[in-house]
Amino acid sequence: MLLAGQVFQALDRRKEAPKPLPARPATAEEPEESAESIEAEAATAIGVALHLHLAALRASAALNLEQADASSWARQGRTQIMRDRLLTHDRPGRK
C-alpha cells in the first residue's frame, strides 16, 4: 500500500510540473483590407453568391427524398413505433 501511494504521489508531481512550451517564431502578419477598399456592388455580389451557395447545400441535405425506404416491412415498423409511442406517452386530456 505504501508503495502504491508513493507511485501516485510521483505521478501527481509530474502533472504539477508542466513542460515549457517551445517559443514560436514571430510571423509577419498580412495587412488586412479595409472596408473602404471594397465597393458596395462587389460586397453585395459576394454576399448573394455565398447565400445562394449555402442555401443550395442546406436544401439538398434537407430534401433527400429519393432514398426513402418504401418497403412494407419499414412502413409496418414505423407504424408500430408510432403506436407504441402513444401508449408510452399517453397524455390525460388527449382522448
Image (cartoon, rainbow, N blue to C red):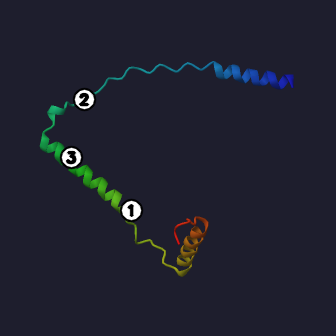
* Kind of residue at disc 2: Glu
| Residue 3, image x, y percentages | 84, 23
Pointer 1 residue: 62
Is 13 above or below relative to 38? above
Q: Nearer the viewer, mark 2 or mark 1?
A: 1
Tag 2, which secondary structure? loop
Earlier in the chain: of badge 2 and badge 1, it is 2
**Amino acid type, mark 1:** Ala
> Which one is earlier in the sequence, the residue at label 1 or at label 3?
3
Mark 2, residue position: 32
| Number of numbered discs visible in the structure rendering | 3
The residue located at (34%, 57%) in the rendering is 57
- Judging by the rendered image, the residue that carries numbered circle 3 is 46
Q: Earlier in the sequence, mark 2 or mark 3?
A: 2
Q: Residue at x 49, y 74 (%)?
A: 69
Residue 30 is labelled as none
Q: Position of residue 72 (x, y in %)?
A: 53, 81
Amino acid at pointer 3: Ile
Q: Residues within 10 Å of mark 3 (few under 14, many from 20)?
A: few
Q: Is residue 29 above or below residue 69?
A: above
Residue 28 coordinates in the image, percent (x, y)? 32, 23
Rendered residue at 38%/20% (across/down): 26
- The spot of residue 59 in percent (x, y) is 34, 61
